[in-house]
Amino acid sequence: MTNQPDQARTVRRRRMHERQAVVFGLLIAALAVTGLGALAVYTGAIDAPFDRPFTTPEETDPLAEVPVPCVPDGTLPVPAGDVHVTILNASGKSEPLAGLNEDVLTERGFAIDAIGNAPDLDGEDGPDLMERTQIHAGAAGVPAAYTLAAHYPEPGLVLDAREDATVTLYIGEDFDDIVDSELVGIAADVPLESREGCVPVEEITPRPLPVPPAEGGDDATAEGQEAAGEDAAAG
């Protein structure tokens, strides 16, 4: 006579073995598929689903290809009163940035010749906008440009075709604030340092001078000059 408990135990053991066989079979099949897929990707037969080449950010500095003029060795900073500056708002912002910079630079002793909005630099109607704050000067004005540049956080330095020692400050979209007077890194008796990677002035082709802004009369106010430029941009 068959023992009922032994018979039940045998049935349970058989079913357990069957389940284990199914589980191990599925695992082996999954490993086989994964291995074949990896081999196909390795050999280039198929593309990896998450294959993404490494990329590097593109250069966004609009002045990256513009050579920076060197200042002659041993040149001392120009006294602020001898630096004649034209301040132009090229940021596209509605704030009177040219006037605000005029106030600060006047307090620091600079000679401000004029302020307003940036004129046409590329032959198209309306003022130009600039991503980066820039200081433009001719060969004679490079020391003055370096002197003024010390009051701004890394402005662009651009050599143009003017023959005098005046400079033009273009307030760009990146403008946030002028450097605190206590942090200006130049001293009257210490020669200016050329920027790294600069090019001697005689080896640079100067940029042409911009189209002059429309004349507004000798009694035009700073705010009026900026407003005129904004109207031109809107039109």
Image (cartoon, grey):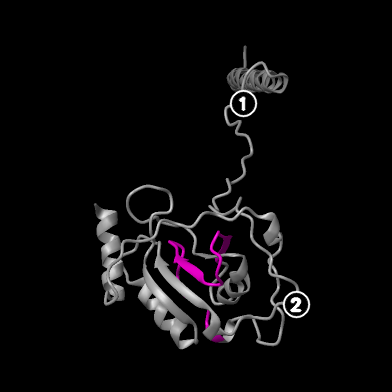
Identify the residue at image location x=64%, y=39%: 54
Residue 117 tag number = none
Image quadrant in which you'd find residue 76: bottom right
The three-letter code of the residue at mark 1 reads Ala
Q: CA distance from mark 1 to mark 2?
A: 60 Å
Task: Give SS at disc 2.
Answer: loop
Q: How many marks?
A: 2
Does residue 46 lie above or below 82 as drawn? Answer: above
Does residue 71 lie above or below 81 as drawn? Answer: above
Report the predominant secondary structure element of the magenta stretch: loop
Which mark is nearer the camera, 1 or 2? Answer: 2
Task: Give SS at disc 1.
Answer: loop
Which residues fall within the magenta stretch? 155-181
Q: Looking at the image, can residue 101 be seen? A: no
Identify the residue at image location x=72%, y=70%: 72
In primary-sequence order, the first of circles 1 and 2 is 1
Badge 1 vs badge 2, beta-carbon distance below 8 Å? no
What is the x, y in percent for residue 176? Answer: 45, 70
What is the x, y in percent for residue 33? Answer: 64, 18
Of residues 50 and 185, the one nearer the viewer is 185
